[in-house]
Image: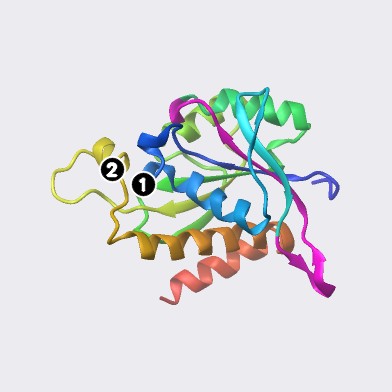
């Protein structure tokens, strides 16, 4: 990995107000936190994405943290690969500098896990990205949303809005997820992954 190459941090989700506060959009909601920390805003990019070129976190001595490009797609979740691939080509960024933030049905709600490569767990956004890139060897931050209660259809569950009662706990999760993204940039992926998973195993 070239130290001068920025990370591309992609938050997966669906566009539009009707999807903005749903479980499927926890990637978007995490990037909203990072945008706020960087006092930045998304601008429309010709690749079919909205991007913000920022510095995240703080280095020793109070210096601004590493550069990153935050991005969300203007397309729907299941066609995320096209915009992500075009943006990576534009930025000349390879899979080794890509971090995708996404919801995960197979993790308990609020649990965070880092992963590089492997399967997509039935996630259509990841499937689209893997297909377009021709590789699964990129980084993911998995945000657990849990399984639907009872016999509720998983598709209905992920597209359901986060309730007002649940929101305070989710806001904490989004802050924690943003912390993980900053740690990946500052400390490196392996060290951050080890620390995060040690923390989870101790719960």
Name which of mark 2 and mark 1 comes first in the sequence. Answer: 1
Across and down, in percent, residue 20 comes to 41, 41
Q: Secondary structure at mark 2?
A: loop
Q: Is residue 47 visible?
A: yes
Q: Which mark is residue 48?
A: none
Residue carrying label 2: 160
Would you name the residue on which mark 1 appears? 23
Residue 39 rendering spot, x and y as whole percentages = 67, 54
Residue at 37 percent of width and 55 percent of height: 107
Q: CA distance from mark 2 to mark 1?
A: 7 Å
Boundaries of the magenta span: 57-78
Q: Residue at x 27, y 61 (%)?
A: 165
Residue furthest toward the bottom?
Answer: 202
Query: Which element is circle 1 on?
Result: helix
- Does residue 56 lie above or below 152 as drawn? below
Verify CB contact (< 8 Å) between mark 2 and mark 1: yes
């Amino acid at each position: 990995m070239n130290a001068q190459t920025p990370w591309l941090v992609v938050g997966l989700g669906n566009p539009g107000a009707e999807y903005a506060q749903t479980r499927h959009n926890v990637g978007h909601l995490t990037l909203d936190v990072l945008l706020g920390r960087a006092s930045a805003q998304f601008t429309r990019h010709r690749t079919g994405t909205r991007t913000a070129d920022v510095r995240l976190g703080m280095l020793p001595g109070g210096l601004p943290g590493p550069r990153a490009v935050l991005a969300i797609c203007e397309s729907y979740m299941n066609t995320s690969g096209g915009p992500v691939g075009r943006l990576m080509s534009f930025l000349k960024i390879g899979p080794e500098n890509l971090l995708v933030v996404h919801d995960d049905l197979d993790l308990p709600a609020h649990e965070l896990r880092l992963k590089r490569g492997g399967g997509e767990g039935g996630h259509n956004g990841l499937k689209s990205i893997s297909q377009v890139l021709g590789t699964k060897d990129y980084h993911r931050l998995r945000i657990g949303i849990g399984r639907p209660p009872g016999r509720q259809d998983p598709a209905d569950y992920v597209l359901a809005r986060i309730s007002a009662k649940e929101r305070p706990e989710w806001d904490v999760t989004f802050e924690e997820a943003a912390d993980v993204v900053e740690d990946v940039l500052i400390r490196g992926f392996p060290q951050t992954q080890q620390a995060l998973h040690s923390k989870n195993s101790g719960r």
